Structures are given as C-alpha cells and as structure tokens.
Amino acid sequence: MFDVIVIGGGPAGYVAAIRSSQLGLKTACIEEYTDSDTNPTFGGTCLNVGCIPSKALLDSSHRYHDAANHLKTHGIDIKNVELDLPAMMKRKDDIVKKLTGGIGGLFAANKVTPISGRGKVIAGQKVEVTNSSGDVEIIESKNIIIATGSSPIEIGSAKFDDKNILDSTGALEIDSVPKTLGVIGAGVIGLELGSVWARLGSKVTVIEAMDDFLFMADKEIAKETLKDFKKQGLDIRLGCKLTSSKSLKNSVNITYETKGKSEEMKFDKLIVAVGRKPNTQDVFSEDSGVSLDERGFIHVNEHCQTNAANIWAIGDVVRGPMLAHKGSEEGIMVAERIAGKHAEMNYDLVPSVIYTHPEIAWVGKNEEELKDENVEYKVGKFPFAASGRALAVDQSVGFVKLISDAKTDTILGVHVFGPSAAEIVQQALISMEFGASSEDLGLTIFSHPTVSEALHEAALAVNNEAIHIGNKRK
C-alpha cells in the first residue's frame, strides 16, 4: 500500500512524486514510456520530445545562423560556414538523455519507487498497471495523482504519416534540411519549430486559420513580433484554413481557403502544430468516479482535486495553460495538500514564453483584458533600441511594456519582446507576487549594463520618470 501513486512521469508527475516523498509519503511513479522492458524513461513530452530538445535546436540553429550571416559586423569573418545536422541532432539527444537519466537519480535519492507500465485508475483507489509484456498488476494507494500529459492534435485535413506530414515530435527528427517547409498553426510550437528550420535554410510558410496573430499575447507585442518575423523570412499567412493535404513520395501538396478563395502550395515537409489534447483516454475505468469534460479534460477544483475522493489531477490534463512550470507547481501544491499542509497556487501569475529569437514573454494582464474588465490602468514602455547592453550584444529589437493600476500603481502585467524576455518577465513576476508597484520597481537598483534595465525604465515610464527616453508631459 502506497500513500501516493503518481501516474505519469513528466514535469507535473515526477515533481509531484519527489515532493510527496520528501514530505514522508510512501510514493510510486508509473510511467509507460520506456527505453527497455523494465526501465521507464521519465521526463514526459517536455524533456523527451518537447521543451528541452526544441530549445537545444533553437539555440544551435541560432548560433549557425549568426555565424553564417551576422558575425562580420563584429569583425569576425568566417568563410564557408557549414551545417553538420547530424552533430546538431546528437547534441540535442545527448542533452535529453542527461536530463531524463537525472530524474532516475532524483527518484533514488528521494526514495520514489519507479514503476514501468501503463496505469489505469479503477474503483477503490486502486491502479491497474499493465507492463510492456501485457502482464497486469493491481496496486493500492491512499491517494492517486493523474499526470498523464498531452499529445499533438491530429486534424482530418492533414493526417500524420511520420514521413512528410509530421507532428511536433517528428519535426525534431528531420534528417536533412527541407528546401520548403509548411507549418500549420502560428502558435508557440509552430513559431518555434518554424524558426529552427528557417535558420537552417528552409523556406518556411506558416498557415494560420485565425485572423489575429498571437491572439493570446498583448496586441502591441503581437504586431511588433509579426513585423520582425516577416523580416526574418517567415512567410506567415493569417486567415487561412487548411482544407486538404496529400502526401506524395517526397513532398506534400496542400489546399487552403483564404478570403473565400482556394489556394494550393507544395512543400517538402509539413508540420502540423495546431495544439495539444489531454492524454485521458483509457486512464479511468467506468466505475472510478472521475468525471471529464467533452474535450477530455479532468474536472478539478482550485486545488486540483477531482470529484472522486483522494484522486487528484495536474498538468496538461486539467484546465489552464499547457505549460511545464504550471504542471510542476500544481504537483507541489497537491503533494503538500495531501501531506496536510496549506498550499495554494496563484493562477493569475503563470508566465508564458515563446523561445523564438527575439523571445516573447508575458505575465499578468494585457491591455485588452483590462479594457474588458473596465480596469483603469497606466502604461510604461521602453525600447531595447535605447538599451546600451542590447545594442552592445546586437539584440536591440523589441521593447518592454509594463502595465499598472491607475489608482494604486500595482503592477498588473508585463509584456516583453526582445533579448532575454523570459528572464525579464521572471524578474517582473517576482515583484508582482509580492504586490509591488511600478514605483517600487522604479526605486530598485538594476545592474548596468544589462538588458534588464529596460524593465526598470519601463517601470519609471509608467509615471513619466524614465531617464533614457522622452516622457509624456504631465
């Protein structure tokens, strides 16, 4: 009998398992993804085929593109820059192996029992585990945490064939640079993967059904981002709905509708990145007592409790953004609540990042949301073109935007497009977690020269006190 069984070993699941064991609870973590019959590979989509390998390729492709196109302005003239794609892919794979192997070490250090197999919740707080050989074992636990993650959505007009029509996993394994690449979906995954292959030499076309670019981001940030991506060579087509595709021997033909007209295009490869769905199929028996919504998400309250006693769900299988850090924090919250501690999670301050170059990141509310909520606000902005450090490192595109309450000056949102956007937003988030005002941030000393000074200046600009740009007259 375990105190806690976690089903799923991704960022939500393995963190929940480790924290549960740290709190003195006898804990097991079940994972069906294995590199052998008995050795589960932890890390989920994020470490194995998502966040980590994609960031490795984003970094490598950026270095290659810089070496081939931008170093001459720094006085570095490199002749005949060559791409070694197999070496780049090996580096990516080595990083993945190091990190996934590290989770096994963390489990051993924290006395978490790893179990290989597919877990299914059945009545009576029991889990049915089926291993790769088909053998079934029933395990009992006082508490069960579901953390089975998500998988790419497949659409009828572009079925995956793992050859020419690829999901996000297949897009990380292309063995040669396609001359032409189509990407369906201009969201986080589509933009990141499109950026990787564009930097390596592909002519990339992004097909997006929505009329608005990055609808979830601040409109000013989205507008500036779209302009810069087009300068980089990404052909982004908005308001285009894919209607059909046909995979041929070495290419893909697609048809899409735009403004009532039908258009055709041909690509060497097609990546479909239209979103992800929760992995909840066959996770519960009919008598488990757990209810799901029409899209397969598990119903939970603000503390991630399902409607069944002592069964919890975290990460991509529940409401909210499908983000690794959100799932991890939910895992910690649930573990602590099981252990009898008071734990909460602030869902208003979950940061979002798109790891293109430049990066895009935000936390809190944007102007459109505040207008809808009839909240009076003030805005301060600072361009990286006026940042000494950004200019020195040749990354002066974009700006920092800070929004605060018009009456209390409390910071309500921070939005960044530019160098180190993710890190800048994280600095802002820490301030927001403690209820800081833009004045508080303006009174904080920032190191010089750093790109973070742009956040400082944006905070000052809210109250017309910025030093390195002109201010609005009071």
Image (spheres, rainbow, N blue to C red):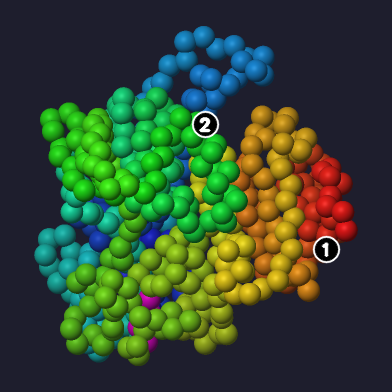
Q: Quadrant of the N terminus?
A: bottom left
Q: Amino acid at mark 2?
A: Lys
Q: Residues within 10 Å of mark 2 (few under 14, many from 20)?
A: few
Q: Is residue 251 visible?
A: yes
Q: Nearer the viewer, residue 183 or 337?
A: 183
Picture layout, residue 376 above or below residue 305: above
Magenta region's main secondary structure?
Answer: strand
Q: For the magenta stretch, what is the residue range?
A: 310-314
For the point 36% across and 27% down, the residue is: 202
Residue 439's mark? Answer: 1
> Is 26 placed left or right of 287 in the picture?
right
Most extreme residue toward the front is 260
Residue 231's mark? Answer: 2
> Is 252 placed left or right of 345 in the picture?
left
Secondary structure of the residue carrying numbered label 1: helix
For the point 38% across and 66% down, the residue is: 316
Q: Is residue 54 visible?
A: no
Give yes or no for residue 312 being in the magenta stretch.
yes
